Image: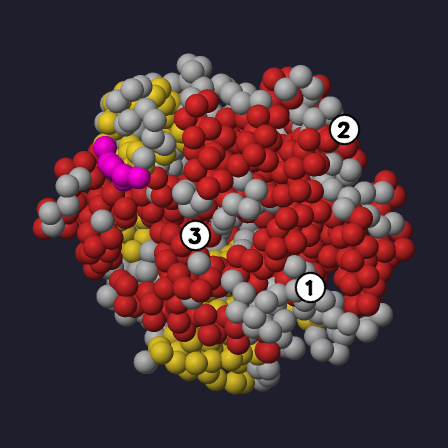
Amino acid sequence: MQSKYQKTKASANRLGDIVKPINYKLFFNTDFKNFVYEGTEEILVSISKQTNSIKINSNKIKFKHAKIMSSGSEQDCSVKIDKKNKITTLSFNKAVSGKATLIINFSGINNEDMYGFYKSEYTNQKGAKEYILTSQFEAADARAAFPCFDEPGFKATFDVTMEIPKEMRAISNMPVKSETISNGRKTVKFMETPKMSSYLLFLGVGKFESVSTSLGKLKINVLATPGKKQLCYLALGYAKKFIAFYEDYFKIKYPLPKVDLIAIPDFAAGAMENWGAITFRETAMLGTEKDSAVSYKQQIAETVAHELAHQWFGDLVTMEWWNDLWLNESFATYMSFKAMEAVFPEWQMDIQYFDDVIATAFSADSLIHTHPISVDVSTPEEINEIFDEISYEKGGTFLHMLEDFATPEVFRAGLHGYLKEHSYSNATKYDLWNAIYEESLKSSMPNGKFIKKFANTWLDNTGYPIIKVNDGQKRARLSQQRFVISKPVGSSIDSQKWIIPIKYLSGSKERFELMTKDKLEIAHAENDILKLNYKQDYLYRVMYEKQGLEKLGHAIKSGKLSGLDAWGIENDLFALMRSGNVKAIDYIEFVKGYCMGVGYPAIASILSHIDWLDFMLYGTKLYDAVKSLGLAFAGEILKTKGWSKKKNEKNIDSLIRSHSIRLLGQLGNPDVIKKANSIFSKSASGKEGIDPDLRSSIYATCAANGGQKLFETVLSMYKKAKNPEEKRRLLQTFGYFAGREEISKALKFCMSPEVRLQDSFVIPAVMSGNPAAFNALEQWTYDSWPKLMEKYEIGTHMLPRYIDNLSMCSSKKQYSKVESFFRAKGNFRGDIKISLQKTLERIKANSTFRSKNGI
C-alpha cells in the first residue's frame, strides 16, 4: 500500500524559477503597544526571461504599496493575493528581465500564534507582564512576517534593520553593525548575512539577560528573559564544547562571527536552528548542573547539540526542497548523539541512542501509513507533516547504518567533501551519495559498489523489513518482508525489498553476509546460538523459531549476550506480540524467565513495554501476570540501585531508578507509595528537598494514589514555580491523577489562561498513557474538539497531538467512533490527516492484539 506522500504531484504552491532573490534589505518598525509593525523591503532579484508579473509568498501581510525598478525606471505594481496558496502576484505593465529591485511597503501583526513574527508574554521580576517579539519561520512562515521567496532553494543575503524601544535589545542572525537613538527609539542595523534560505532568518526584540563566552574568534551568547540568567550557564558550557567538536569533526570552522542561543517563553517547537540566532523552548535550554535532573540535562545537551549541528547541516548547506528534509533533521539527530558521546563519554550516549532514537524509528515506521525518509511534498501542510519520527529518528538510524556500512573513515571524509562542495548553497541526497561514494573509491572498503543502491533502498522504501529464520543442520535460511504491526508476518503487504547487511553471531563467531535478494542461506551449526543483527546496528527485526529463541534466552540469562543484543531480541519479540505473531503470555514468560537482571538498554525497553501492557491489559484476565512481572522486574531494580544516588553513578542508573519507582507506584506497591508520600510531604513542608532525579517519579506516584488535597497542593506549587523545568514537571503531574474529580479539573485547567498555549497539550498527553484517566480523556476530546480547532491554528502544529492521544483505544467501537467523528465535515482539518490515519491503524492493531489474546 502506498503512502499518500508518494502520490504527491507538482502543485500551485511553488513559485517557479524565473525570478530569484539575490539580496533583501528589510526594515521593521516595532510597536509594543498595539503589536502592529510597519515594514519596508527592497528585494534585488534576477529575472531569467521577460515577464510582467512576479509571484512572491505572503500570508496575512497587508500590502501598502509595491513597485519594481529595472534599468533605471520604476513601475507601480498591482497586487493580487491568493490566500489559499499564500502567494501574491505583483503585476506591472512593461515586461522586465535581468536585475531588478522590488520595493514593498507592508504591515503585519505580532500575534500570539507562535509562528511568523509573533509576541511572547512573560512575567518580570516585579510580577508584571511584559512581552518580547520573536520569530519562527520554518517551514513556510517567513511569508507570515514579510513578503519573500519562501522556498529553501531561494538563497539570498539579508540586511536587517529594526526600530525598537530604546531600552530593549534587538537580535538577528548577524552581529549589530550600528545603533542610533532618537526620540526614545533605537534603530539597530545588522551586518549582512551570508547567502541563506528565508526560513533561517531571525527577528527578536526584548529585554534579554545574557551570558557569554568565546571560542577563538567566535562569540557565543545565551539569552533569556530577566531573572533567568543563572539558568543560562549550563547551555553555554554545552554549546562551546559541541561547537569545538563539530569544527574538528567537519574540518570547517563555525561559519558566522557569533551564535546566540535564545530561550523563548512561548515556542511551539522544541528549538529552531536560525543561523546564528538559535531559539529554544525554555524547558529545552534553561537549567543548572546542580539542581536539574539527569534526564533534563541530557535533554538540554541533546537539543543544543542538535541545533548546533544544523548550523552546518541545514544552514551552511541546505536541502534544495523539503523532500530532502532528512538531510537537515536526520543529520542533526545523528550528530547530536555523536557530539554528546565525544564530549561526555561517561553518559554512554552511544548506547542510549538505541533505546532513544532507534527504538522510536522501529515504532513509528511499523505502520502501513508511514512514508519514506526521502519523500515528495509540495504544500506547507504536507511539509509540516514530515517533521516527524521518520525524518528525525529513522533518518538518524539510517545514518548510523550508513556509517557502519561505509566505515567511519569513509563516512566522515564524505561528509567533509559534501559540506565543502555545497557551502552557502543547496544540495540533494544524490550530492551526498556521490561524496561518500567518491571517498569509498579511495579506500579498500568491501561494500563500496553497493553504497548507492544500499542508500536508495533505505531512503526510498517505506517501512523496514523483518527477517524470518528457519534453522537447519548446517545452514540457516533467511527470508525478508516488510514488517507492520497491523498484520502478522507472512501477510501480503507489498513487494519492497531491502539490501540488508547481515551481521550475525553463530556460536561464538561473528560473521557477515549481504542480503541483496528475497532469500539468503548462511552458514550456521544447528546446536549453536544464532543471533542476527549482532550489535543491533541495522533497522530490521528478526523472527526466530521457538527453539532458536529459547537458546537466545539462555544466552541472555547467562550473560553471554550483551544488554544491547538482549535489547534487540526483546524489542523484536514485543513487536511480534503486538502484531499478533506471539501471545502476550509468551512474551511475559520470556522476560520473566530470561531477562530478570538484564543490562542496559534492554532493561529500559522492558520497563517501557510493561507500561504498555499495564495499560492495554488493565482489567483483563491477563492483568495479574503483567502486574506480577512489573512488580518483580522493577522491584529487583530498586532493590539493586536503592533510592539514593551513589557517588559517580552513571546517568543510565539514575534514569532506570526513576522509571522503576514510577512503575512500582503505578502498579500499587505499598512500600513505594508510602515512601514517595513521605518524601513529598517533607518537601512540601520545607523540611527536606527532593533529589532532582526522583522528582518526576515521586510526583507521579503520589498523584496516581492521591486525591483532592494533593491536587490543590500540586496546583499551588505550579502557580508559584519559577523554574521552567519544575513548572513542566508539575504540569505533567496532573496527568497521573486517577480520581474522576481530579481528572476533570486537570482537563479544565490545561485549557485555562494559566497554562501557556505551547504547554496546553501536556496534561492530555500524559493522561493518554494513564488507564484510569483514558476514558475521560477520550470523551473530553470529542466534547472539546470545536474549541481545540479554534485554539490551535495550523501554524502551531499542535492539533494533531490530540488525535495521537487516542492511539491507545483498542475496540472496534472506539475505532468506528474515531473514524466517523474526525472525518465528519466540520471536524476534519488538513493538518490532522496523517495523525488520523496513523491513530486508526494503531487502534486496529490494538484491537487485533486483544482479540488474539482472547480479551
> Label 1 amino acid?
Glu
Q: What stretch is highlighted in magenta?
A: 508-513
Q: Quadrant of the N terminus?
A: top left
562 to 780, vertically: above or below: below
538 left or right of 142? left
The image quarter in which residue 13 lies: top left
> Label 2 amino acid?
Gly
Q: Is mark 2 on a helix, strand or loop?
A: loop
Q: Indicate which disc residue 726 carries.
A: 1
Measuring 36% from the left and 78% from the top, which residue is drawn there?
215
Q: Quadrant of the C terminus?
A: top right
Magenta highlight on residue 184: no
Q: Magenta segment, principal secondary structure? A: strand
**Residue 704 x %, y %:** 78, 47
> Label 3 amino acid?
Ile
Rounded to the nearest whole Å, what is the CA distance between mark 3 and mark 1? 28 Å
**Residue 507 x %, y %:** 32, 35
Residue assigned mark 2: 619
In front: label 1 or label 2: 2
